[in-house]
Image (spheres, helix red, strand yellow):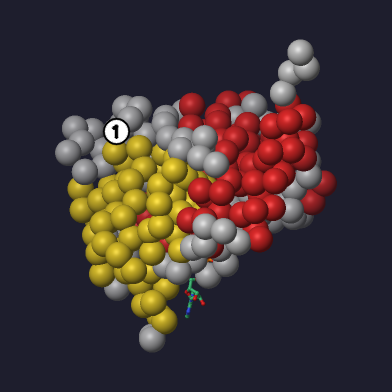
Amino acid sequence: MVDNPDGPVPTGELVLSLRGISKNFGAVSALTDIDLDVHAGEVVALVGDNGAGKSTLVKILAGVHQPSSGTISFRGKQVALADPSAALTLGIATVFQDLALCENLDIVANIFLGRELNPLRLDEVAMEVRAWTLLNELSARIPSVRVVVASLSGGQRQAVAIARSLLLEPKLILLDEPTAALGVAQTAEVLNLIERVRDRGLGVVIISHNMEDVRAVADRIVVLRLGRNNGIFTPDASNQELVSAITGASNNSVSRRAERRQAQQDQIQEPRP
Ligand SMILES: Nc1ncnc2c1ncn2[C@@H]1O[C@H](COP(=O)(O)OP(=O)(O)OP(=O)(O)O)[C@@H](O)[C@H]1O
């Protein structure tokens, strides 16, 4: 149980705990008996093949879908996430892949969209300062908070979306494919952002298909396969272990190729005598 539900969560405290979560869409079982724990100051990567149930799980946590059965506990208390605003109010923020930013508005307007500090009189200066502070805390590389989102790179957009989600001081943040379609430098920027968010003591859940990104930033890797838990790994797990858990086969062409590539990389990285 929590003394102060609005206060910061001590690092290591269990923020989110799912037990036996199932979700059916008619005859389709998208999730069956899922368990998941996320602690404060921890990055958990949710990985799995297409159709494994990752998006469905994130939508349940965002209050978009209701589970068919199972329990969700947040900071030690069983909760119902009846709709997205219930999840937000509780302290669960979600950054969906489309980021939901307005291209023609500047960064300040995007961060505060619908949450202006004083709805009767827009306090532009205070909002600008808050936007800068949030982006600086994330070490985001943004030239000015007065540029329109349309002019930003993919990594910068992700920074704005994350800053926006931090405005309500959540305890848990869910990031859906935050590095999808980004180049190498922008991906590095976003991984850096994720580390900054973790350093703030939040629990972070990222969905990713990119094992390199997952290894670089995750403290634990949770594999879903065909809507079920299929293993929890540390980032030092071998490619073969991860690919086997994701695909359900221990000796297939994907895992063999991944192993060969890993062996080649190890050879390249080995220091010359
Ligand atoms: N609204 C829905 N109605 C019916 N079936 C759905 C719905 N949403 C998801 N599903 C089904 O649930 C299963 C899990 O889908 P989900 O999108 O959660 O997987 P995913 O792991 O996120 O996949 P991807 O990596 O392709 O996004 C799939 O079989 C999918 O067809």
Please indicate, yes or no, whether residue 177 appears anywhere in the rendered image: no
Residue that label 1 marks:
13
Q: Is residue 111 left or right of residue 104?
A: left
Q: Position of residue 98 (x, y in %)?
A: 64, 59
How many numbered tags mark residues here? 1
Residue at the image position 64 percent from the left and 42 percent from the top: 212
Q: Residue furthest top?
A: 273
Picture layout, residue 228 above or below residue 138: below
Residue at the image position 63 percent from the left and 42 percent from the top: 213
Residue type marked 1: Glu
Q: Quadrant of the C terminus?
A: top right
Mark 1 residue element: loop
Q: Is residue 266 left or right of residue 63?
A: right
Q: Residue furthest bottom?
A: 27
Asked whether mark 1 and ligand 1 are closer than 8 Å, the reply comes as no
Q: Position of residue 21 (x, y in %)?
A: 30, 63
Picture layout, residue 3 above or below residue 156: above
Front residue of 246 and 267: 267
Q: Residue furthest right?
A: 151
Q: Position of residue 12 (x, y in %)?
A: 33, 30
Please indicate, yes or no, whether residue 15 appears anywhere in the rendered image: yes
Residue at the image position 38 percent from the left and 69 percent from the top: 31
Residue at the image position 82 percent from the left and 46 percent from the top: 151
Is disc 1 surrounded by few (<14), some (14 to 19) or many (20+) residues within 10 Å?
some
Q: Is residue 175 left or right of residue 132?
A: left
Q: Position of residue 91 (x, y in %)?
A: 37, 45
Q: Which of the 4 quarters of the picture holds residue 20?
A: bottom left
Q: Quadrant of the N terminus?
A: top left
Picture layout, residue 190 above or below residue 35: above
Q: Which of the 4 quarters of the picture holds residue 3?
A: top left
